[in-house]
Amino acid sequence: DQQVKQNSPSLSVQEGRISILNCDYTNSMFDYFLWYKKYPAEGPTFLISISSIKDKNEDGRFTVFLNKSAKHLSLHIVPSQPGDSAVYFCAASDSGNTGKLIFGQGTTLQVKP
Amino acid sequence: NAGVTQTPKFQVLKTGQSMTLQCAQDMNHEYMSWYRQDPGMGLRLIHYSVGAGITDQGEVPNGYNVSRSTTEDFPLRLLSAAPSQTSVYFCASSRPSWEQETQYFGPGTRLLVL
C-alpha cells in the first residue's frame, strides 16, 4: 500500500509561470515532510521541508503547503525556471526520523523556455 | 567534505552472483539508509541504521543484508543476485531525528542483473 502518493507523473509549465506539485499521504503518524529534486544520473538533493506543526514554509522561489486534515501537501515554484526541470519527490517520516523516509513515486517537471 | 560516496557507479552481475555495494559518509551522521529506485515506484527503503551496530529493515529488505560496524560505512550485500534486483541504489545519511535534518544522498549505483 503506497503511503505517499504523487498522482501526477509529469507536469509541463512555461518559464516564469507557477509550478504546483502535489502529494498525498495516508499515514496520520507522518509529521515531517520533505521535497527532493533529482536530476538524471544524480542522487536526490534536498529542496525544502515542513513540520506538521506548520502549514507553510518558504525558501526563496519554493513554498511548501501542508493541509493535515486532507493529508495533502504541495510544492509551489514561482517563478519557474528551465533549470527547475527535474524529477521531484515528496517524502514523509514519523517523529522526524529522517533515517526512514517514505517516498512518493515522483513527478517529472518540465519548464519550457 | 566528500559527503556521501558510493562505489561502484555501475555493475553488471549474473543471476546468483553476490556483491557488496559500498557506501561511506564523512559528515559524522548517525543515520544511514539504503534505497532502490525503480521506474514508477519512487525510492523504496531497503534497510536503515540509526548508529553503529544497529540496523533495521525498511519496505523491501528481502534479498539484501546490511551491517554497520562504523559510523562512516554502511555496505549493502546482495547474497544471490536476481534480475528483480536490477535497479539504481542510493545510500543516504542524516543526523538524529530531533534535529529535523534532511537526508543527504550519494550519486547512486546502477546495478544490472542478467
Image: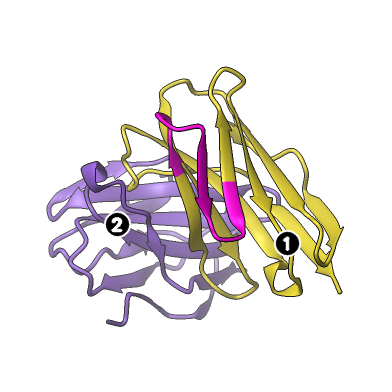
Chain colours: A yellow, B purple
- Quickly name the residue at label 2: B94
What range of the chain is rendered magenta?
A50-63
Residue B72 position by quadrant: bottom left
- Quickly name the residue at label 1: A79
Of A14 and A104, nearer the camera is A14
* Residue A7 on image: x %, y %: 74, 38
- Say whether residue B63 is left or right of residue A61: left
Q: Residues within 10 Å of mark 2 (few under 14, many from 20)?
A: many
- Name the residue at 31% across, 82% down: B2
Residue furthest top as drawn: A69
* Residue A56 on image: x %, y %: 52, 38
- Say whether residue A35 is left or right of residue A40: left
Q: Is B82 covered by the magenta stretch?
A: no
Q: Residues within 10 Å of mark 1 (few under 14, many from 20)?
A: some
Question: Which type of secondary structure does the marked residue at label 1 adopt?
Answer: loop
Q: Which chain is disc 1 placed on?
A: A
Of B111 and B73, nearer the camera is B73
**Image quarter (top left, top right, bottom left or bottom right) of the C terminus of chain B:** bottom right
Q: CA distance from mark 1 to mark 2?
A: 30 Å
Q: Which chain is disc 2 placed on?
A: B
- Name the residue at 60% across, 65% down: A38
Residue A95 position by quadrant: top left
* Residue A79 on image: x %, y %: 73, 61
Q: Could you tell me if residue B86 is visible in this image?
A: no
In this view, B22 is above or below B103 = below
The amino acid type, in three-letter code, at marker 1 is: Pro
Circle on res. B101: none
In this view, B7 is above or below B51 = below
- Say whether residue B78 is left or right of residue B97: right
**Image quarter (top left, top right, bottom left or bottom right) of the N terminus of chain B:** bottom left
The amino acid type, in three-letter code, at marker 2 is: Ser
Q: Could you tell me if residue A59 is visible in this image?
A: yes
